[in-house]
Amino acid sequence: MSPLDRSEPLLVEPELKRLDGTVREAYVPPLVTPGTYGSLADIPFDNADHEPGAVVLSRKDHGRGDGGRADGKDDRGGGAGDGREDTNGSGGGNGGGTPAGDGGRWRDVTAAEFAAEVLAVAKGLIAEGLMPGDRIAIMARTTYEWTLLDFAAWAAGLVTVPVYPTSSVFQTRWILQDSGAVALAVETSAQAAALGPELDRIPDLRHMWVFDKGHMERLAERGRDVSDQEVAVRRGVLGPDTLATLIYTSGTTGRPKGCALTHGNFFAEVDNAIDLLYPIFRAKTDEEASTLLFLPLAHVFGRMVAIACMRARIRVGHSPSFRTEDLLADLKSFRPTFLLLIPYVLEKVFNTARASAERMGRASSFDRAAAVARRYGEALESQQHGTGPGPTAFLRAARTFYDPLVYRRIRNALGGRVRYVICGGSPLGRRLAAFFAGAGIDVFEGYGMTETTAAVTVTPPVRPRLGTVGWPLPGTRVRIAADGEVLLHGGQIFRGYWDPQAGGVVPTGPDGWFATGDIGRLDEEGYLTITGRKKEILVTDSGKNVAPAPLENWLRSHPLIAQAMVVGDRRPYVTALLTLDPEGITHWRQMNGKHAVPAELLVDDPELLRVLQRAVDEANRLVSRPESIRRFTVLPGGFTEEAGHLTPSMKLRRETIEEAFSAEIEGLYER
């Protein structure tokens, strides 16, 4: 059943199983009957058949004309064109639309128009000789062309392989070799040039296309002699069990592994998410539902939401630049009604607003407004659970007073219309979730991973439990093993890992349960809380088990701290490495007259260390004395993806960091 066929949204409470009085398993039945036929390739064409005039995408126009079409040079070397890298967004289109803050415009794309583009590019892929089941890699930022090629590849019967645009040449070569990709589409000619010397070491790769050289248009031209029927035949043989994509894990340890996700995995995920999150996808309001994608489409989180929006015919825009000024301009011009974010972005929004208030001499007013918002959000939560009367008259009046002064400014920074946020990647924390709820933005926090096609749990509408990652997504079972590990079962669980030496996909196991490696607990109503990674649990010399995640997440939310890594495995006590947030520390220097202090001396500044010590003391309130951070050091630089400290999804590569900063760590344990 399509999620659009259901007339009323449903909210089903979990079925719970207990062991020795403790909730050990929670299950929510599916809201949508699993399909037995069809694939993701059908979505654009179904949309065109059912509602051809519906706006499903908006495309940014930056006045690039026809995009610089190729002149027919060899595919592996890229085509001709102007060679420019479009640093603000994808090109194409000269139509009307909403004026954009940087001089571009958003041109609406209807369901019929998008289906026609998908068909044309799919025919081009067929004309180039790609066969059903072939792997095609996509290495680009979050652009219109990414989504177009994704659906076109499926329509041609192919398997897409996302590659982060920030990946090194070595990482990219490994993914292309391991997946056996026969084609690669990159965003820029610079990316194509960087991979040029490696092409002889990737024997399966026969084609390379470059977005900013107009190669999508070239593919469409190449396919003009291919019949529509050929695409229809290829679509017709696809089914829920057909492999749709290989998404390679971030690789916090060892080499990345390819997660084999089927079309059915995505349907189980997005169809139930659409029905569950009805305020986002299904509620009928005066405002057209829309979202601006800017998180990487190479990550399963962004990819899932993009597919869900296409499935639900929700207007989507793409913002490829993560620079603050570019993103704010796109948010202002696009004006989405909901966003998908990682906690880091919400932390930055809050901290930036607080820093702005401090510069204007209104820090105390902002802090009072933040306290009101948190109390208001917590009161709403109690009311929705039937454990409290809701916000008092005084609290409602205080919120009304602070709305134009603080809360509306925060909503305006996100475009002015955002009312909902889907948040994942790491725990958000109760304080921040309550603040945004009180400020008029409901946060649906979720938990999942690549192997689970994104979310397996999510905050249910009108029943939030702040500080948790919600209930099981409908159709999903969550079980807590004896050692605290989170086990998962459901239609969105991947088929297995890709292993070319074994001839393809290696199944995960006969029982269908997936061991996540995460440690968590279920409360008395079935809400899940993630407390850490099984492999990351630190064991001190005294035998105390320490989960670093709660401490690190708390510290990372501080405006002066960019990243934190807790250390203590096989050590006498727990310590931490801290890196400074560039924007936060710039503001702190301005407010404290530290402009003249050299950067290399700032990490030892007594005033700064006192501020950071207070942050550490606050974090230590979360844990017992043996688990608390005894000492910390501030590193002169940050953890970066380029240096190998972080994965593309901002996760810490702990072994790499410990090796890089071994001297600093040893210094924390000197007597």
Image: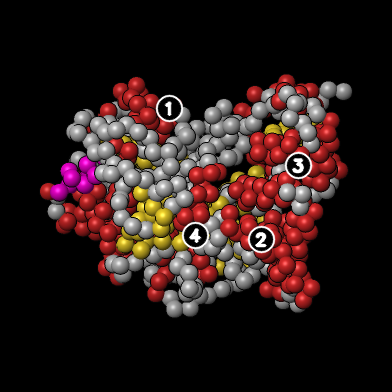
Report the disc number at residue 336. Answer: 4
Q: Is residue 638 visible?
A: yes
Magenta region, residue range = 215-224
Residue that badge 3 annotates: 546
For the residues labelled 3 and 4, the Cα–Cα distance comes to: 40 Å
The answer to which of marks 3 and 2 sits earlier in the sequence is: 2
Tell me the crowding category of disc 2: few under 14, some 14 to 19, or many 20 or more residues within 10 angstroms, Cα based: many
Nearest-to-viewer mark from 4 and 1 = 4
Identify the amino acid type marked 1: Val
Disc 3 marks which amino acid?
Val
Q: Is residue 412 magenta?
A: no
| Label 3, label 2: how far apart the Cα atoms are | 37 Å
| Residue 588 place in picture, x, y as percent | 74, 38
Are circles 4 and 1 on residues that touch, CB within 8 Å? no
Circle 4 residues within 10 Å: few <14, some 14–19, many ≥20? many
Report the residue marked by disc 2: 407
Q: Quadrant of residue 232?
A: bottom left
Say the numbered circle drawn on residue 652: none
Residue in the foreground of this view, choosing between 318 and 19: 318
Between marks 2 and 1 in the image, the one whose residue lies nearer the viewer: 2
Choose the circle earlier in sequence order: 2 or 1: 1
Q: Is residue 65 above or below residue 420?
A: above
Looking at the rendered image, the disc whose residue lies closer to the viewer, 4 or 2, is: 2
Q: Is residue 222 magenta?
A: yes
Residue located at (32% from left, 65% from top): 47
Going from the N terminus, do you reach mark 4 or mark 1 first?
A: 1
Q: Amino acid at mark 4?
A: Pro
